[in-house]
Every structure is written in structure tokens, then in C-alpha cells.
Amino acid sequence: MESQNSIVIDGGKYSFNAGETVLQVAQRNGIDIPTLCYMKNASPTGACRMCVVEVEGARTLLASCVTPATPGMIVRTDTPQVMKSRRLNLELLLSSGHHNCLVQDLDMDTWTDFQLRSMSADGHKDLCPVYGDCRLQELAIKYQIRGIRFEPAEPGHKIENVNPFIVRDLSRCILCGRCVQACNEVQVNNAISYGYRGARSKIVARGDRPLKESDCVFCGECVQACPVGALVPVRDIEENDPSKGETRLIRTTCSYCGVGCQMYLHVRKGKIVKVTGVEEVGPNYGSLCVKGRFGYNFVNSPKRLTAPLIKEKGNFREASWDEALDLIAQNLNKIKKESGPDSLGFLLSARITNEENYLAQKFARAVIGTNNVDHCARL
Ligand code: FES
């Protein structure tokens, strides 16, 4: 039975579960097969052909992300043919639009030299906005793609930057389809899909209109899924300057509602420059809503209140937290004494955590003695 449900990958024998693909078996066993279009939580499309492997008895190389594991299958992931195919694929992709990540010009021996040159020769403005954070660039470096073998095709797509959140530069799109899967299968917004045919193929939103005239809710799931620089947050374009210094990733919990989405704050010099979802963990597995992903400007706003205010004779004045809390306690006690606990009500918020909401209702019931508790989510 065991041999019936096992395959051989690069000489090692691995069991598989019904329905698993070769890629899934490989990934589960720590065997590296490069992917571009594959998305873990969506149905595989087999669009990019980066994950090709050799399967004994097969007439051609097979895309491992769409090839089901079958009993006795013998797979090789790193033969000369496989490498050649992946390299050719990368060269074609790099020639299919504007991918000015300088990988094409790479004729130096070390990654450090490459970085230094790219930062000084052209200046950051000429770099792709996802320079250094691009799956295509990463693979091109790994597979040592050098020079331009194929004349780059002019895609002729205009940059769309007419919404406040996402810049769409389809001249950098490699048509992997991850954004479509993210929108349709993960978020189920169905705002974008494939349009046109052949060389004119592109990802379109409602009859090829700008995103803001479509069903897009700007959750940014497509941005997170894009492996190149075709979909980039507007702020990234402004912040794309390697000379501004290193960006640190800080994992935290989104504070916009009680769901508890896990996110990374990309922080540079004490300022949030980007937010991404944490892909490996729940409850959100990388997804965020428009507020969580793009609504972080307030954090560094100089208009933000940083101290409590007490209103006296029609005017607010700053106070310490101790003074403000003493005043609240005093007034709650006074009202309760004069008019009874049910003269007080507690309106809680979706903007605080579940734990804070729990504590607030506990305070209302156990300390004040009223069941007058409500929550803005009921609106
Ligand atoms: Fe398999 Fe793209 S990852 S075809």
C-alpha cells in the first residue's frame, strides 16, 4: 500500500495523499522547486512554467504545480533540461515588459557589487519600485540570467494611478494571474479577470476600466500576491529610496477591529512605510482589508491626540491620564449615586480588541451594575 502511494523525487521516496500535486509533495518534504504563479490557497493555474520538472515516461517537462502525484512516479527537479527551461522562461519574462531591475545588465560576480552599482549608477527613481523585493528578480539572480537575449517587447500599457491606494503598471505584469486568484478565490471580490487575447492579454477590471470604477474594494490582496512590480501601493512609489535606510519588519495585531489580523509593519526610522499581512498564520493568512493595509498614516500624524483632554468652560485643556481617569471615576460615581446604575450606558467599539470589549462590559455589569451595554457593530 505504501509503495502504491509514494513517488520518487530526486532519488528520495515520499508518500503522498490523494489529490496532492508533485509540487505539494516536494514542498512538504523541503525540496525546493521554484514557483511564480502558484498560490497556496488557490487553485493552481500552471501559467508561468517555472515549476517544471522531469517525469520519467512523460514526453515533455511538466509543471509540478498542476501535475497530480501518481503511484510510482519518478521525478527529477534539477536536470540540465529543467534548468535550461527555467532559465529560458525567465529570459522571456524579463523581455516581456519593463523590468528595469538591472538584472539584465548583471555582469559582475557578486551580489554586493550588483547592489552597490544599482544604487549609485541610476539612482533609486529609475529602479523598479519593488527592487529587492521581487520574485522575478530573485529567480533571475538565482538562475544567473545575464544580458538580454531577446529584444524586450513594448507592452504599451499606461500606468494607472488614479486611485489613492494602488499603482497599476501593467508594463511590468508577467500575467501570472496571482492577482486574479487573490481577488476571486481568496477575497471573493471578483473585481479583476483576464482580458483580451494573445500578445494583447492583460488583467482588466470591469471592461478594462480603472480600478476605482470597478468592484474593487482596495483590500490590496492583489498587491500582496503580485510577485513583480505591476501592483504597488502608492506609498511604496514615494518611499522607494534605498538610501533612506533599512526597513525593519515588526509583527503586530491590527487594531482596526476585533478580528485580530496579523500584520507586519515595515518601519523605517521610526515611521511606518508599508503594511503587509502575515501569510503563515491565522486568522487572516496574509489577507488584510483596506483599512488594515493602507490606513496607517494616522500613526505618524502630527494632528494625533497624544494626551487626554478635559473640557472646562467650553475649552479643552491637556491633562495627565491620572487626572482624566480620576475625573471619569468621580463623575460615574456621582451619576450612579444620584440616578442609579441604569442611568449609565456603555457603548463599546469595534475599534478595540475583543479582550478590551470583554473588560468594558465586565466593568459595566460588575462595577457599575448595569446591563446597558451596546456595540457599534450592531449598527
Ligand atoms: Fe507552476 Fe507557475 S508555479 S506553473
Image (tube, helix red, strand yellow):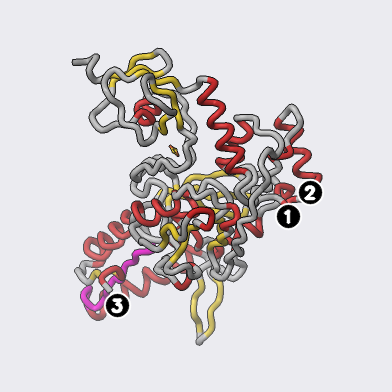
Residue 369, horizontal then vertical, whole percent? 21, 67
- Marks 1/2: CA distance? 8 Å
Residue tagged 2: 122
Residue 142 colored in magenta in the image: no
**In the rendered structure, are the residues bearing label 3 and label 2 in contact, judged by CB atoms less than 8 Å apart?**
no
N-terminal of the two: label 3 or label 2?
A: 2
- Marks 3/2: CA distance? 68 Å
Q: Which numbered disc, 3 or 2, marks the residue closer to the eye?
A: 2
- Marks 1/3: CA distance? 61 Å
- In which quadrant of the rendered image does the C terminus lie? bottom left
Instruction: Identify which residue is drawn at 79% across, 49% down.
Output: 122
Amino acid on which the number 2 mark rests in the picture = Asp
Image quadrant where residue 280 sits: top left
Instruction: Identify which residue is drawn at 73% across, 51% down.
Output: 124
> Magenta segment, which residues?
340-351
Query: Which labelled disc corresponds to residue 367?
Result: none
Amino acid on which the number 1 mark rests in the picture = Lys
Residue nearest the observer in this picture, 241 or 53:
53
Residue tagged 3: 335
Residue tagged 1: 125
Amino acid on which the number 3 mark rests in the picture = Ile
Residue 3, horizontal then vertical, whole percent? 24, 14
Q: Looking at the image, which residue sits at the far bottom?
A: 314
Taking the image as shown, residue 167 lies to the left or right of residue 28, namely: right
Q: Disc 2 on helix, strand or loop?
A: loop
Residue nearest the observer in this picture, 164 or 90:
90
User: Mark 2 near ligand 1 (CB under 8 Å)?
Assistant: no
